[in-house]
Amino acid sequence: MTARFSFLSFFALLIVAGIVAPIAIVLHELGHFFAFQYFGYSPVLHFDGCSVSGSHQIPSDSQAIVIAGAGIGFTVALSLLSLVVFYFVRHPIVFASGTVFAGRNIALLPLILFFGVDGGGDDRHLSAILGLPEWSLYILILVVNFVTIGLLVKFAGKNQKEMLMATIIGGIVGVVSWLFWLGPSILP
């Protein structure tokens, strides 16, 4: 007989995912922030983005590739790192972290398709600079993210459905609370 995933375990994982989701957003934007700094710009970190203040200089194409790719790269690297760590450690917190990191672009998909939200901006910007079809990098990153989450779920073994559900719910609550409440008050 296998042990049931308790309500307390579900709730704890939901809370972890809710905390990790805003952290994932900020880490993604920090990738852009540090890339801007590397090229000598004065970036300003916001709750939902990164901008450059006091500079009218437009980044070159090579700088724009690094700046746009830095956020994407940071997010993908964190999700893949979580996958590798979870393979060896198998701790629910690592599962929640990896799923939230990888789920970032997946979560945008319904918003883009059904509500016209301008998601995937970094991916589309990067595709345009590289001369690729507009959604090509977004689709490639989605595939990587789906595979990452699939492997996390596979490695989770028992209680994988409950773990995934708690992480999805917590991630959604975390993103919504960050974008509409916490984020604007902390990083306007």
Image (cartoon, rainbow, N blue to C red):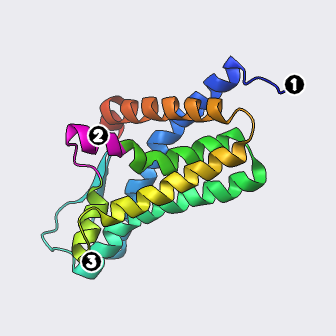
Between circles 1 and 3, the one closer to the viewer is 1
* Residue marked by disc 2: 111
Quarter of the image for residue 180 reads top left
Say which amino acid is labelled 2: Leu
Q: Where residue 128 appears, x then y in whole percent?
A: 22, 71
In three-dimensional space, the C-alpha distance between marks 3 and 2, rounded to whole angstroms, equals 25 Å
In the rendering, which numbered label is found on residue 1? 1
Residue 175 shown left or right of residue 101 in the figure: left
Mark 1 surroundings: few (<14), some (14-19) or many (≥20) residues within 10 A: few
Secondary structure state at the residue bearing disc 2: helix
Q: Quadrant of the N terminus?
A: top right
Q: Is residue 40 visible?
A: no
Which region is colored magenta? Answer: 108-119
In three-dimensional space, the C-alpha distance between marks 2 and 1, rounded to whole angstroms, equals 41 Å
Residue farthest to the left, as pictured: 56
Secondary structure state at the residue bearing disc 3: helix
Asked if 35 appears above or below 156 in the picture, the reply is: below
* Residue marked by disc 3: 130
Circles 1 and 3: CB atoms closer than 8 Å: no
Say which amino acid is labelled 1: Met
Circles 3 and 2: CB atoms closer than 8 Å: no
Q: Residue at x 31, y 46 (%)?
A: 48
Q: Residue at x 32, y 40 (%)?
A: 110
Does label 1 or label 3 sit earlier along the sequence?
Answer: 1
Q: Is residue 85 visible?
A: yes
Circles 2 and 1: CB atoms closer than 8 Å: no
Q: Quadrant of the C terminus?
A: top left
